[in-house]
Structures are given as structure tokens and as C-alpha cells.
Amino acid sequence: MDIHNYKRRLERTIERVKESDISEDNKKIILQFYDNCSTESLSLSKTERYIFDILSYAKTINKPFLEASKEDIKAILNIFSEDVEYYETPFQRLKNRAEIELAWKEIAPQTDIKLDFEVFNKEGDKYVVKWNLKFFDKKEFVYKGVYLLSLNSDNKCNYFMQYSEGK
């Protein structure tokens, strides 16, 4: 039983890829990636998240993937330590910075982004951050959530977990 309706969420994400204003080359790459995910027996939720993230990245860099520079990504990745424990959800750990890079690339196409946040609690190098996010990607999206994070002695994030709900 799919109580989270991952099948429909994945279908909507694929529709967004096809209807997006990203380059046809990027659409082709994303849809090929989707086909590969299907043959690799990845869960619907993980596949949807990957496709969503890659679409967001395509929108963010606003250029063909093959023309993206390392500087486009490095600026985002530089806030994380090399050994970061990074969870997109409590159950979805990204294994390395390459996977984090893919996840951050998905936000590229979002526009009219409004993010409000508040450090709700701080204890030593550990933080709880409440946040509200609105953005436009063919339609308006609204999310609320909490980040749990910690920083190492170099002020790099070495633990990141996100809890969120959207409508």
C-alpha cells in the first residue's frame, strides 16, 4: 500500500520535467536517468526525489548540464564537510557529496523563492532551525520544516537532516 502516493508524485514530477522550460538536452538526460532508475529497481520515493532534485538543479544553473561549471556546484557544496551525514528525509541518506550535489541541482529552476528561518534551539555546535519556504515552479509550492544540523570546528556542516511537509 502506497500511503504517501509515491507513484502519483513520481508521475507529476516526470510531467514537470516534460513541461519545464529547461533545455531539450537536459530533459532527455533526466528522462534517460529516470529509465535507468526504473531498471535499477530503486524505490518510487527515491526515484522521485532524484528526478525532482535533478530538475531543480537544471533550473538553477539554467544551462545544459554539459556546460555546467564546477564553480556552480562548489559554492553550494563548500558549506558541507567531506564526511557530512546528509539526510534529505529521515530515511533518505545521501551517501556522499556527489549525491548532495545532485540534490542541490534540483532547485535551479525554482523562481520567486522566499525562505524564512529561525534558529529554534542551539546547544554547542548543534542547531534546530525552523523554516518556511515558498517558491514557484510552474505553480506555487509551500513547505514548512525543520533542519537538524551540526558544525565541525571549521564551521562546516557535518550533520544535516531535514524534516518537511508541503502542499
Image (tube, rainbow, N blue to C red):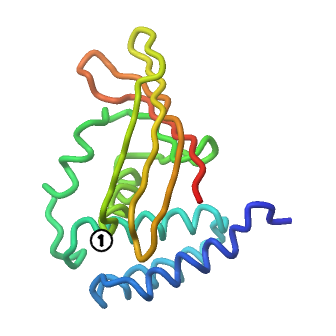
Q: Position of residue 106 (x, y in %)?
A: 38, 64
Q: Position of residue 105 (x, y in %)?
A: 33, 61
Query: Image quarter for residue 5?
Result: bottom right
SS class, disc 1: helix
Q: Residue at x 37, y 60 (%)?
A: 102
Query: How many numbered discs sit on the rendered protein?
Result: 1
- Going by the numbered disc 1, the residue's amino acid type is Lys
Query: Measured along the vertical axis of the image, is residue 47 above or below residue 122?
Result: below
Residue 48 is left or right of residue 158, and the answer is: right
Q: Image point 40% across, 71% down: which residue?
A: 137
Residue 149 relative to residue 3: left or right: left
Q: Residues within 10 Å of mark 1 (few under 14, many from 20)?
A: many
Where residue 112 appears, as percent x and y from the top left, is 30, 62
Q: Is residue 73 above or below residue 14?
A: above
Identify the residue at horizontal 15%, vertical 74% (top origin). 67
Query: Vertically, is 121 above or below 40?
Result: above
Quadrant, the C terminus: bottom right
Q: State the residue lying farthest toward the right.
A: 1
* Quarter holding residue 158: top left
In the image: residue 5, left or right of residue 17: right
Q: Which residue is mark 1?
A: 59
Residue 159, image quadrant:
top left
Residue placed most toward the observer, 40 or 110: 110
